Image (cartoon, rainbow, N blue to C red):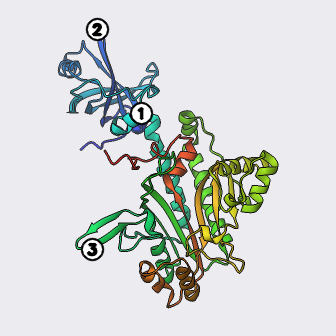
C-alpha cells in the first residue's frame, strides 16, 4: 500500500510513485495540456496531464468534469522540473479519484480575497474562511507556540491534568456563570479550573498545568472577550513569593516565543509581516501606583483616584508604550493591586496588598497571577468577609489538612494569539468563536 504523503514532503520523493490527497485549487484546461493545482494544509503542487498521450484519455475526461475546491486522490510520479514556477516540480498522474465534488462550483465568497467580506459572514462559513492560507496558519502558529510552552513545563517536571467543566458550584463568583440542568439539580460550566488546581496542590502534585475551555457568562462584545475560550493554567507549590510565579511565567513565554520564531518565524513574517520578538529576562515590573504616576508624567494621562485601583483599558494600552519607552521591552508585570479588586483566594500582605500581578503584553492584559492563600484560618476569614458561604465549602476543605505555599496564573490562548499576530479580534483566533450573539456553527 502506498503511504499518503503531504505536499511539503514531495521534494523528498522525486521519481517515486506516491499517493496524494488534496483539494483542487485551480484548473487550467488548454489545447494540449491540463494543469491542475492541488492544495493541502502544507502547500501547493502542479499536476500535469498531456492530452496527446492515449493512456491519459480517462484522466483528461475526469479533469474536464472537475471543479475547483473538489477533493481528489492522486497516484502518480513526482518529477523535478525547474521550468515549473510552483516549487520546481510536478506530478504526472497514473490515476485520479474524485473523492468529493464541489457541486455548486461558486463558493459563498472568495476566500482568497477577504477584503470585502464581512467578518460575520466569514464566521458563518468558517469552513470556507479557513481555506484562506493566512487564516488557517493562525492555528499552526497557535499550536506551535502552545507546544513549546507545554514543552517548557514538561522539561521542568510539571504534570498535565484535566479538570471537570461541569461543576456543582461557581468557580469564582455566581454572577458570570452559565447554569445548566444536571438531572434533578443545577450545575455550572466552569469559569476556570482554579479550585481544582489548588486541590492538586493540596494533594501533593506540586507542579501542574491544564489547557482547556473556560466559560464566562459576560455580555461583553469587545475584540478580546468570548463566552468560551481556551485557558492555559499553571499552578506550582513551595514558592517563596509571587515573584517565583512571575519568573516561571516569563521563562515559559520566552522559551515558547524563542522556539516559535526558530520554527515558523520566516512564514509568520511572510504572511503577517510580523517579526517575533523574543523577550529578554527578567521582564520589567512596576507597582500600580507608580504606573499611573509615570503615565501622567510621560503621556499626560490622568484619571480620577477612584479608577486607580485597577488598569483602565487606555492605561493598559499606555503600559505597552511605557514598557517600550522605559525598558525597551514588550512585556510589563504590574503589581501591588488592592486586594478588594481580586479573587478572595489571592494572598494579601499585612497592609492588604495583593500578592499578585497582571502581565501586560503589547498594551493588553494577558494574565492575572498570584500567590494563593493556603492557610486554612486565613482563607476562611477572607471567604466570610466576602460573604461566600456554601458555594465554597468544598473548596475550603482542601486547606484543612495541610497545603504547601503555592501560586499560579492563567493565559488566554486566543488573546495571546491575537496579540502575537496582530489580529484585530479573538473572533479570528478561535477556531469557532462563541460570544453573546454567536452560538453557531
Horizontally, residue 135 falls left or right of residue 63, namely right
Residue to which mark 2 is pinned: 31
* Mark 1 crowd level (few <14, some 14–19, many ≥20, 10 Å Cα): some
Residue at 40%, 70% (x, y): give it: 163
Give the mark, 3 or 1, whose residue is nearer the N terminus: 1
Residue to which mark 1 is pinned: 132
On the image, the x and y values in percent for residue 112 come to 42, 27
Give the mark, 2 or 1, whose residue is nearer the N terminus: 2
Whole-angstrom CA distance, mark 3 to mark 2, is 71 Å
Whole-angstrom CA distance, mark 3 to mark 1, is 45 Å
Residue to which mark 3 is pinned: 185
Residue at 54%, 71% (x, y): give it: 235
Residue at 47%, 79% (x, y): give it: 199
Pick the front one: 368 or 56: 368
Up-down relation of residue 410 to residue 427 (above or below):
below
Q: Quadrant of residue 176?
A: bottom left
SS type, badge 1: loop
Amino acid at each position: 500500500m502506498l503511504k499518503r504523503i503531504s505536499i511539503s514532503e514531495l521534494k523528498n520523493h522525486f521519481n517515486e510513485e506516491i499517493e496524494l490527497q488534496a483539494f483542487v485549487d485551480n484548473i487550467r484546461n488548454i489545447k494540449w495540456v491540463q494543469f491542475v493545482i492541488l492544495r493541502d494544509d502544507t502547500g501547493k503542487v502542479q499536476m500535469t496531464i498531456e492530452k496527446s498521450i492515449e493512456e491519459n484519455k480517462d484522466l483528461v475526461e475526469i479533469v474536464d468534469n472537475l471543479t475547483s475546491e473538489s477533493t481528489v486522490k492522486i497516484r502518480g510520479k513526482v518529477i523535478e522540473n525547474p521550468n515549473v514556477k510552483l516549487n520546481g516540480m510536478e506530478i504526472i498522474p497514473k490515476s485520479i479519484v474524485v473523492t468529493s465534488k464541489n457541486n455548486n462550483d461558486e463558493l459563498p465568497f472568495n476566500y482568497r480575497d477577504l477584503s470585502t467580506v464581512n467578518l460575520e459572514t466569514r464566521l458563518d462559513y468558517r469552513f470556507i474562511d479557513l481555506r484562506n492560507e493566512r487564516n488557517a496558519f493562525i492555528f499552526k502558529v497557535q499550536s506551535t507556540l502552545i507546544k513549546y510552552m507545554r514543552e517548557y513545563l514538561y522539561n521542568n517536571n510539571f504534570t498535565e491534568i484535566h479538570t471537570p467543566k461541569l461543576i456543582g458550584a461557581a468557580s469564582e463568583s455566581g454572577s458570570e456563570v452559565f447554569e445548566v440542568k444536571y438531572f434533578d439539580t443545577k450545575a455550572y460550566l466552569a469559569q476556570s479550573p482554579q479550585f481544582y488546581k489548588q486541590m492538586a496542590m493540596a494533594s501533593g502534585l506540586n507542579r501542574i498545568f491544564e489547557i482547556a475551555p473556560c466559560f464566562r457568562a459576560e455580555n461583553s462584545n469587545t475584540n478580546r472577550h468570548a463566552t468560551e475560550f481556551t485557558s492555559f493554567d499553571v499552578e506550582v507549590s513551595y514558592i517563596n513569593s509571587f515573584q517565583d510565579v512571575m519568573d516561571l511565567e516569563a521563562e515559559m513565554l520566552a522559551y515558547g516565543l524563542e522556539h516559535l520564531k526558530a520554527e515558523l518565524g520566516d512564514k509568520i513574517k511572510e504572511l503577517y509581516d510580523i517579526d517575533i520578538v523574543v523577550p529578554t529576562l527578567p521582564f520589567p515590573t512596576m507597582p500600580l501606583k507608580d504606573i499611573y504616576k509615570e503615565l501622567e508624567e510621560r503621556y499626560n494621562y490622568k484619571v480620577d483616584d477612584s479608577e486607580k485601583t485597577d488598569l483602565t483599558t487606555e492605561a493598559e494600552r499606555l503600559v505597552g508604550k511605557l514598557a517600550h519607552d522605559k525598558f525597551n521591552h514588550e512585556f510589563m508585570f504590574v503589581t501591588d493591586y488592592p486586594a478588594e479588586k481580586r479573587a478572595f483566594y489571592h494572598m494579601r500582605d499585612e497592609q492588604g496588598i495583593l500578592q499578585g500581578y497582571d502581565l501586560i503584553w503589547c498594551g493588553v492584559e494577558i494574565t492575572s497571577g498570584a500567590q494563593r492563600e493556603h492557610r486554612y484560618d486565613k482563607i476562611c476569614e477572607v471567604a466570610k468577609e466576602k460573604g461566600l458561604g456554601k458555594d465554597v465549602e468544598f473548596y475550603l476543605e482542601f486547606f484543612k489538612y495541610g497545603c504547601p505555599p503555592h501560586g499560579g496564573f492563567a493565559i488566554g490562548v486566543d488573546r495571546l494569539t491575537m496579540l502575537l499576530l496582530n489580529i484585530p479580534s479573538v473572533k479570528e483566533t478561535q477556531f469557532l468563536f462563541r460570544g453573546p450573539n454567536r452560538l453557531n456553527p
